[in-house]
Image (cartoon, grey):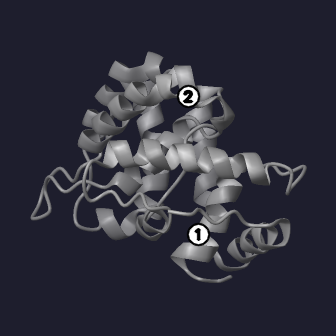
């Protein structure tokens, strides 16, 4: 399907509308700091991820929480794989990364599933993308239901494969919009998500 590439005005408008409407960005900053500060300590890293997931993904986790011990084990088992992506940006994405991305996605999908209650076992590909982004904020893009559908990557089946495809699409978009903003403290992927969120999730632009 054809992919919409925003022009400079539309992209900046999306980021501005996000700033005007969305008040939860403080939790993103806190979670980003915690993950960075405690890098290499999976237990504390898991706590940092939890700060974001339990606020940004509250609508999902109100039915039950994930198990922090399982998330810690997932991070421990995959730390070297995660570190491979930590300092990379999405422009370095290649097909040789596909297997590692799928492995991380599937492991986090299990670790972040609801652990108890009536919704036990329910999984959230959205939570996985949020976690991956915090672990490698310049490499892994964010998505949600409406954003994934807008890019033809809806994740009702084979979510790991759909996420790899989404990464490839966002890489192409990043190449086009990389010069649209300057001197931002935010990563390019965060800005792209703000644009997507404004356009596709809420229709502010």
Is 169 displayed left or right of 61 in the figure?
Answer: right
Tell me, yes or no, if residue 115 can be seen here: yes
Is 190 displayed left or right of 15 in the figure?
Answer: left
Q: Residue at x 84, y 51 (%)?
A: 184
Name the mark on residue 94: 2
Nearer to the camera, 33 or 191: 191
Q: Is residue 6 above or below residue 139?
A: below
Q: Residue at x 86, y 50 (%)?
A: 179
In the orientation shown, which residue stands out farthest toward the bottom?
204
Front disc: 2 or 1: 2
Quadrant of the image occupied by residue 120: bottom left
Quadrant of the image occupied by residue 137: top right
Rate crowding at label 2 as few (under 14), some (14 to 19) or many (20 or more) other CA atoms within 10 Å: few
**Residue bearing the label numbered 1:** 197
- Residue 83: x percent and y percent? 53, 21
Is 183 displayed left or right of 60 in the figure?
Answer: right
Tell me, yes or no, if residue 186 can be seen here: no
- Residue 160: x percent and y percent? 34, 42
């Amino acid at each position: 399907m054809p992919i919409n590439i925003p022009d400079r005005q539309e992209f900046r408008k999306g980021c501005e509308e996000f700033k005007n409407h969305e008040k939860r960005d403080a939790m993103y900053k806190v979670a980003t700091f915690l993950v960075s500060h405690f890098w290499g300590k999976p237990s504390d890293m898991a706590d940092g991820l939890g700060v974001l997931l339990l606020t940004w993904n509250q609508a999902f986790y109100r039915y039950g929480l994930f198990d922090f011990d399982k998330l810690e084990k997932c991070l421990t088992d995959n730390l070297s794989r995660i570190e491979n992506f930590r300092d990379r940006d999405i422009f370095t994405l290649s097909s040789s990364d596909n297997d590692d991305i799928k492995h991380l996605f599937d492991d986090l999908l299990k670790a972040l599933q609801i652990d108890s209650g009536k919704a036990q076992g329910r999984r959230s590909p959205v939570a996985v993308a949020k976690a991956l982004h915090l672990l490698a904020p310049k490499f892994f893009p964010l998505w949600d239901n409406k954003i994934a559908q807008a890019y033809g990557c809806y994740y009702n089946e084979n979510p790991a494969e759909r996420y790899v495809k989404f990464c490839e699409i966002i890489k192409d978009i990043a190449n086009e919009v990389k010069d649209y903003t300057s001197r931002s403290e935010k990563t390019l992927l965060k800005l792209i998500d703000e644009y997507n969120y404004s356009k596709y999730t809420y229709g502010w632009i």
